[in-house]
Image (cartoon, rainbow, N blue to C red):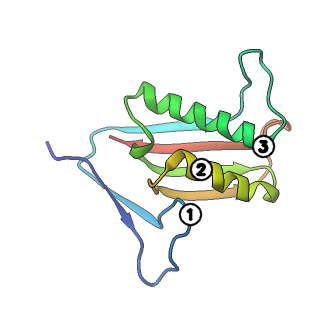
Amino acid sequence: MTELAITPLNPPILPAATGNYTHGVEVSGGQRMVFVSGQVPWGDEQGRIPEDFEDQCRMVWRNVLAVLEQAGMSVENLVKVTTHLSDRQYRAANSKIREEVLGDHAPALTVFICDIYAEEWLLEIDAIAVG
């Protein structure tokens, strides 16, 4: 059995990746893959959905991490993260919170500005992890 290796791919012909992402990710030695469905701010224990973007973003990341934890994985296993934002104004806050959650880990990353299924949801995040 080979050891899991997640290697960032940043070709020199591309601009340097800024923030918590890499242009590509090579995975070798992985035996399992986890596909995390789009996670949204489903609501707290009382079913309330925060109105504030930062609170929604932290709630969504909590949901992503819960799926990873159930699979025996963590942030370090993420190889691809896709974030859907309901408005361009949330880009900076999203980047800041993503950096808090990911730390030094830099998976492949895509961010879309688009409509989200429910109007009160300000973002949705889906992900792929390997282990």
Report which residue position mark 3 lands on: 53
Q: Are marks 3 and 2 in contact (CB under 8 Å)?
A: no
Binning the other alpha carbons within 10 Å of mark 3 as few (below 14), some (14 to 19) or many (20 upward) gives some
Element under label 3? Answer: helix
Q: Is residue 117 above or below residue 92?
A: above
Q: Earlier in the sequence, mark 3 or mark 1?
A: 1
Task: Please say whether residue 39 is visible from this viewpoint.
Answer: no
Q: As drawn, is 10 to the left or to the right of 21?
A: left
Single out the residue that lies furthest toward the left: 1
On the rendered structure, is 43 left or right of 35? right
Q: Residue furthest bottom?
A: 13
Q: Position of residue 34 (x, y in %)?
A: 42, 37
Which residue occupies 72% across, 59% down? 92
Which residue lies at the image location 25% right of the left edge and 47% below the top edge? 4
Residue 19 is labelled as: 1
**Element marked by disc 1:** loop
Q: Disc count in the image? A: 3
Cα separation, mark 1 vs mark 2, equals: 9 Å
Q: Amino acid at mark 1?
A: Gly
Number of the label disc, if any, that sits on residue 98: 2
Quadrant, the C terminus:
top left
Looking at the rendered structure, which numbered label has been put on residue 55? none
- Badge 2: residue crowd in 10 Å (few <14, some 14–19, many ≥20): some
Q: Quadrant of residue 57?
A: top right
| Quarter of the image where the N terminus is located | top left
Up-down relation of residue 78 to residue 32 (above or below)? below
Residue type, label 2: Arg
Label 3, label 1: how many angstroms apart (C-alpha)? Answer: 19 Å
How crowded pointer 1 is (Cα within 10 Å; few <14, some 14-19, many 20+) is rated as: few
